Amino acid sequence: MSKTKMSPIWGIIEDNVPDDAEYKTADGLDDALLGVGQQFSGGCNCGHSSGGSHVWVAVYSYSKCLDVFVKRDGMSYDEAIEYMDYNVLGAYLGENMPVFLMDLQYGLGLCEGED
């Protein structure tokens, strides 16, 4: 996962996110990129916020990722879900991993045109 910066949304992100912000992106999924966000990372496991910091993360639409796999790669909807869940959500490459939003407005993962 790396910053590919192919999508027009990258211009908006670059204008609004600090230059030194570090976050990972999902290769080949720029069409599903919603933007970036921040989350708290680190600290102790006792509920206190001491020792932690805010980190930047890329935010993607889960259902739009499925659309990419169906349209670009010719997968069936079920294959796209399996691929997404195992190969994308199941990958851990360290901190600042992307977040995949289960977007309600798109029916929690229904591909465009699916009922």
Image (cartoon, grey):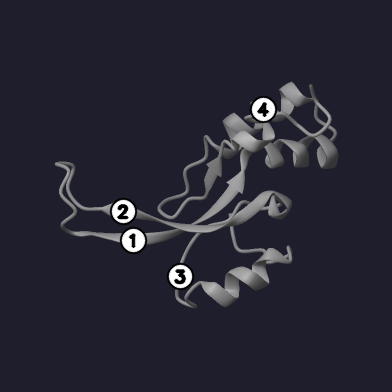
- Nearest the viewer among 82 and 17 is 17
Which element is circle 4 on? helix
Q: How crowded is mark 2: few (under 14 residues within 10 Å), some or many (20 or more)?
A: some
Marked residue nearer the N-terminal end (1 or 3): 3
Residue located 47% across and 43% down the image = 92
Are discs 1 and 3 less than 8 Å apart at CB? no
Residue on which the image places disc 3: 21
Identity of the amino acid at label 3? Ala
Are discs 2 and 4 less than 8 Å apart at CB? no
Residue located 65% across and 37% down the image = 105
Marked residue nearer the N-terminal end (1 or 4): 1
Which element is circle 2 on? strand
* Residue 41 tag number: 2
Q: In this view, does 49 lie to the left or right of 16?
A: left
Residue located 19% across and 53% down the image = 49
Residue on which the image places disc 1: 54
Look at the image and tell me in which quarter the C terminus lies. Answer: top right
* Residue 81 tag number: 4
Marked residue nearer the N-terminal end (2 or 4): 2
Identity of the amino acid at label 4? Ile
Rendered view: 98 above or below 64: below
Identity of the amino acid at label 1? His
Q: Residues within 10 Å of mark 1 (few under 14, many from 20)?
A: few
User: Residue 93 location, x and y as percent?
Assistant: 47, 48
Residue located 76% across and 38% down the image = 67
